[in-house]
Structures are given as structure tokens and as C-alpha cells.
Amino acid sequence: MRHKALAATVAALALVVLAASPASAITDGVPDGENHPYVGLMVAQDDEGNPMWRCSGTLISPTIFLTAGHCTFDADHAEIWFQSDLEPTPAAYGYPFTGQVGGTPYVHPEYDDAAFYLHDLGVVVLDTPVILPTYGTLPALDQLDAFTKSGKKDATFTAVGYGLQKSFPDAASWKTEALRTRMVSTPKLNSINTGYTGDGSLILSNNAHTGGTCSGDSGGPNFIGTSTVIAGVTSFGKNSTCAGTGGVYRVDRADDLDWLYGEFGDQLP
């Protein structure tokens, strides 16, 4: 059963799109280049085509883009970019209105926005296929439980996303780094299957040594090691400066895999 100990402290890591402000990547990471071309930047839109917020996500097939539930909830449409770097002129790429491909958003059937972290999984079904040689892959059922065994606590993950590189309080917001660039970091496992995480989340490191995630990275993948296997999607942080640790929603549980394969199985490998 999903645990509710996270309730009072978490904040979703989607980034609201404001026309006059710099939209945002991974904290203390490095540019990803073309290492993960199946990881994209997503902008959720309302029924009139107005941009609402931005997230990250992963193609797991030519037409299925995996992201966080709080990224697709209440969205009518999504536009997605797979360029590794939209700088220095994002508008030249159609941002934030017209991406390389658009699609229809879906959210986990048990998702509740008031407790988003319990079933924080979303999908965008693309209008047209994006053909690549490699895609992200889903984990096996309960695969991450292996990390609770002795010697697994130093496991490393690969976090990829387009969120803020650095975030500061309002008084120092001028120092915030917010390039629209796909970034990568290698956070370590902090906790799994505890009273705090329940059985549905991972807590990963977020510091200058390992890097971590921040606003705009929501929905982005956290791959197991250097593989293409998605342990979970970036879900929440504990503070506005993205310091300390970051929360990842696991996608290896039965309710997640049953929904993905049951609803979209004809479009998955």
C-alpha cells in the first residue's frame, strides 16, 4: 500500500511557463548532448493552446512519452521537444507553443492531485511517431526492491531533464540558472522501502558532488545505473532551492505496469 508520510513536505517539480521569465535542468550536472535523445521537454497546454507548465519525460516507444502524473493532470494537450539544447533562442524552436511533436495527455487512474506523489505517473500519446534507434525501457515488476538488500544503498542512478540548473530564494533569484538544455547527473540512492518513502518512492541525493533534480525536471527519467531502464520519474523536492534530496516516483509497481501495458500495450515493445 502506498504510504502517506510524504504529505506535508513535498512540492511538485513542474515549472510554470511564464512568457516573460526564463523557463528552465538538472542541478550540478553536465550537458547531456545526444546521450539520451529519447528524453524530451514537454509543455502542457490548456484547451485553447495556452502554455501552463513545463516538464521532462521519456519516449518508451515511438508514440508513448512517459512523464509524471502532475505534469499531465488537467492538461488538454502537450507539445514536446527532443533537441538537446534550445538555447539561446527557444522561440526559434517554436517554444513554448509548437514542439517537434504534439500529443494527448493521460494520467494514472488512481492519481489524486491533493496527494500527487502516491500515483504520480502520466503518459502523452504522440500524434505522430518519433522513430529512434533506442528508447527508454520499463522496469520489471518490483525490480527496485533488490536495492533494499545489503550493499545496495550506494546504488547510482542517471537523472536526465530540462529543469533548473540552480535555484535560489527570491532575494537571490537573479542567480538562478535556467537554460533550456537537456542535462544529466548521477544521484545516489538515499532511501527505499522505508516508513517515509512507503513502497512507491525513492529518495535520491541532490548535492554538488552527485547532482540532482529541480523545477522543470518533473517527469524526467531516473535510469538504473547507466542503463535505459527507468527506475522512476522525477516527482518532488523538499524545498524551493532543490537542495538535499529529491523524490522519484517508482514505476515498477503492479498498478503502474498494469495501467501502462493494459492501456497502451499495443504501442509498447
Image: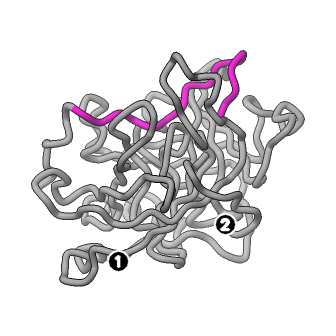
What type is the residue that disc 2 sits on?
His
- Confirm whether the magenta stretch covers residue 67: no
Is 13 positioned to the left or the right of 245 in the image?
right
Would you call the spot at circle 1 few (<14 residues within 10 Å), some (14-19), or many (20 or more)?
Answer: some
Q: What percent of the width, then of the height, locates residue 87?
A: 82, 41
Mark closer to the chain start, 1 or 2: 2
Q: What percent of the width, then of the height, locates residue 184?
A: 60, 60
Q: Quadrant of residue 176?
A: top right
- Dot 1 lies on which element? loop
Provide the major secondary structure of the magenta segment: loop
Q: What percent of the width, then of the height, locates residue 230?
A: 46, 67
Tell me which segment is drawn in magenta.
9-24
- Confirm whether the magenta stretch covers residue 19: yes
Eyeballing the image, is 146 above or below 169? below
Residue at coordinates 25% horizontally, 65% vertically from top-left?
Answer: 254
Q: What percent of the width, then of the height, locates residue 58?
A: 57, 58
Q: Mark 1 to mark 2: distance in Å?
A: 21 Å
Residue at coordinates 69% horizontally, 61% vertically from top-left?
Answer: 32
Eyeballing the image, is 223 above or below 67? below
Eyeballing the image, is 63 above or below 154? above
Q: Quadrant of residue 35?
A: bottom right
What type is the residue that disc 1 sits on?
Ala
Label 1, on which residue?
140
Q: Quadrant of the N terminus?
A: bottom left
Is 147 positioned to the left or the right of 65 in the image?
left
Label 2, on which residue?
36
- Dot 2 lies on which element? loop
